[in-house]
Image (cartoon, grey):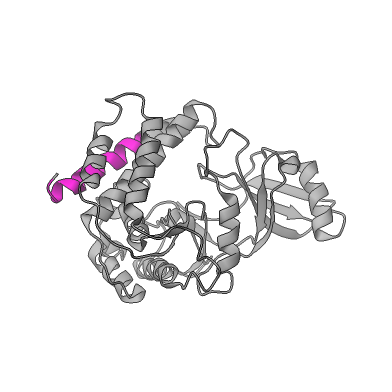
């Protein structure tokens, strides 16, 4: 979907008067006209466009439901946005974090409202082929800048743990899968992926700031130019292995259009979209990579996507989701990620 990021007409999950009172103190003046409208899409933290007598911002908060430990970490989002503000990584300015749940029911933060375009499909419909090429180059170069960042110099030296990232992550996500699964035969492809990964963990201490969910839908582009003006949704960010971000960002080349807007089946050359090989080559050149992506990284990204989607489905079934159709979407994507992961693993000897 090619759309200018704009307010929708749905309601808020908090009392607007409480926000009005807070903004009166925050802005240092009485707020008369207040508009709060949720952004479109997303299955995690509720996000709203806020207009208060001409002042504009985006409000991001935790969902008003029982949360899993370390989930919906908007405090980490706010911290990384503040840290990146004066770097060459484009992010919205972070205005204020408020940890008191007594105002809106959960902690929340306010950040800059960026005017731009959000594409939920990697096909980026509506663009000329030449603009798609530039758009992909910009997204790729932005990812490389994230991974080149001296994270210690901007105060993020303790933002994650050092050591083998994959060992910790496979352990963590396998535990989550054991919580989400409904039985031994729930998703055998996912189980097979996990077994394949556990026997192939690479030894690497490469460490960088990682976004955690760096797909095209979490990037906002200039309203008319094919360039990134903001990277959004840093909820899963941490210090980790940069090729995990790369694998997430390139999942589209191994997924179909109905699977999170993938690229399989599209005529990439005619559309101006690089091949996965060319895109990776562009990334390596700009990131100064010392390691290159393998099928292990691709399968790991599919594994995490599958487990995360299974979690979305469970929360939807329990009524603990911000998206009405999340149970069905989560189930579908969990199976889709698992199927694609097995296909990739098969190339390397499942």
Observer-nearest of 348 and 274: 348
Asked if residue 118 is positioned above or below residue 68 in the image, the reply reads below
For the view shown, which residue lies furthest in the left direction? Answer: 349
Q: Is residue 295 magenta?
A: no
Residue 20 location (% of width, % of height):
80, 48
Quadrant of the rendered structure where residue 292 is?
bottom left
Observer-nearest of 244 and 41: 244
Q: Which residues are magenta?
A: 332-349
Residue 79 location (% of width, % of height):
59, 60
Residue 138 location (% of width, % of height):
41, 70
Observer-nearest of 209 and 133: 209
Q: Residue at x 60, y 39 (%)?
A: 63
Predominant secondary structure, magenta span: helix
Quarter placement of the C terminus: top left
Q: Kindly tell me whether residue 7 is visible in this rendering.
A: yes
Residue 68 location (% of width, % of height):
52, 37
For the view shown, which residue lies furthest in the front direction? Answer: 163
């Amino acid at each position: 979907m090619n759309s200018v990021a704009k307010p929708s007409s749905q309601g808020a999950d908090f009392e607007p008067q409480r926000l009005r009172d807070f903004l009166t103190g925050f802005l240092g003046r009485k707020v008369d006209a207040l508009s709060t409208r949720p952004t479109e899409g997303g299955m995690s933290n509720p996000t709203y466009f806020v207009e208060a007598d001409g002042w504009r911002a985006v409000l991001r908060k935790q969902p008003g439901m029982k949360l899993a430990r370390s989930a919906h970490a908007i405090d980490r989002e706010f911290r990384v946005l503040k840290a990146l503000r004066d770097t060459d990584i484009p992010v919205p300015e972070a205005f204020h974090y408020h940890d008191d749940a007594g105002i809106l029911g959960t902690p929340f933060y306010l950040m800059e409202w960026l005017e731009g375009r959000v594409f939920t499909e990697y096909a980026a419909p509506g663009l000329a082929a030449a603009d798609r090429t530039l758009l992909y180059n910009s997204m790729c170069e932005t990812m490389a800048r994230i991974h080149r960042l001296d994270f210690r110099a901007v105060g993020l030296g303790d933002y994650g743990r050092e050591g083998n990232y994959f060992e910790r992550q496979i352990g963590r996500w396998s535990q989550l899968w054991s919580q989400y699964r409904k039985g031994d035969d729930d998703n055998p492809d996912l189980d097979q992926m996990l077994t394949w990964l556990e026997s192939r963990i690479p030894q690497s201490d490469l460490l960088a700031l990682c976004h955690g969910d760096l797909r095209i839908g979490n990037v906002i582009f200039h309203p008319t130019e094919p360039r990134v003006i903001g990277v959004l949704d840093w909820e899963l960010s941490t210090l980790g292995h940069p090729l995990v971000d790369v694998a997430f960002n390139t999942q589209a080349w191994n997924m179909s259009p109905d699977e999170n807007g993938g690229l399989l089946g599209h005529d990439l050359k005619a559309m101006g979209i690089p091949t996965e090989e060319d895109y990776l080559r562009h990334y390596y050149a700009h990131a100064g990579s010392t390691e290159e992506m393998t099928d292990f990284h691709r399968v790991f990204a599919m594994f995490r996507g599958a487990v995360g989607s299974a979690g979305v489905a469970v929360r939807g079934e329990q009524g603990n989701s911000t998206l009405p159709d999340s149970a069905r979407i989560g189930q579908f994507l969990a199976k889709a990620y698992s199927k694609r992961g097995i296909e990739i693993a098969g190339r390397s000897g499942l």
